[in-house]
Amino acid sequence: MKDVVASTPSLIIIGTGSVGVVNVSEEIVDFIKSKGIKLVIAKTAQACKLYNELSKKENVAAILHSTC
């Protein structure tokens, strides 16, 4: 996570798995927001779609959970 934040994206997208099982802690949410980075948390398929759309026009990072 620290490496992703250090790359200074304007937005981080976190994919929580195909059915949204992964829980993103408040500590992670607060850390990202404290750096002035926007955050989207979504099921991985939605996260991938959003990343593919936005990465063409802005500096976006994605952290994707690929199972469950």
Image (spheres, helix red, strand yellow):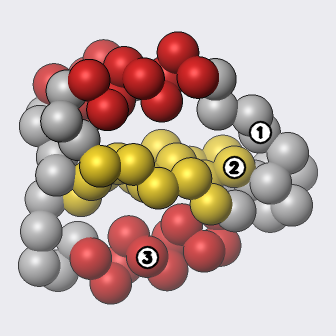
Q: In which image quadrant can residue 25 be found?
A: top right
Residue drawn at the location 49% of the way across and 22% of the way down: 28
Q: Which residue is mark 3?
A: 50
Q: Which residue is mark 2?
A: 16
Name which residue type carries label 3.
Leu
x and y percent of residue 65 in the render? 66, 46
Q: Looking at the image, which is closer to me, 45 or 30?
A: 30
59 sits to left or right of 44 = left
x and y percent of residue 26 in the render? 58, 23
Name which residue type carries label 2.
Thr
Mark 2 and mark 1 residues within 8 Å of each other at the beta carbon? yes
Residue drawn at the location 49% of the way across and 80% of the way down: 49
Q: Residues within 10 Å of mark 2 (few under 14, many from 20)?
A: many
Name which residue type carries label 1.
Val
Q: In which image quadrant can residue 21 be found?
A: top right
Task: In the rendered structure, find residue 44 and report the number of the disc placed on it.
Answer: none
Task: In the rendered structure, find residue 22 and report the number of the disc placed on it.
Answer: 1
Q: Quadrant of the N terminus?
A: top left
Q: Residues within 10 Å of mark 3 (few under 14, many from 20)?
A: some
Of mark 2 and mark 1, the one earlier in the sequence is: 2
x and y percent of residue 51 in the render? 38, 70
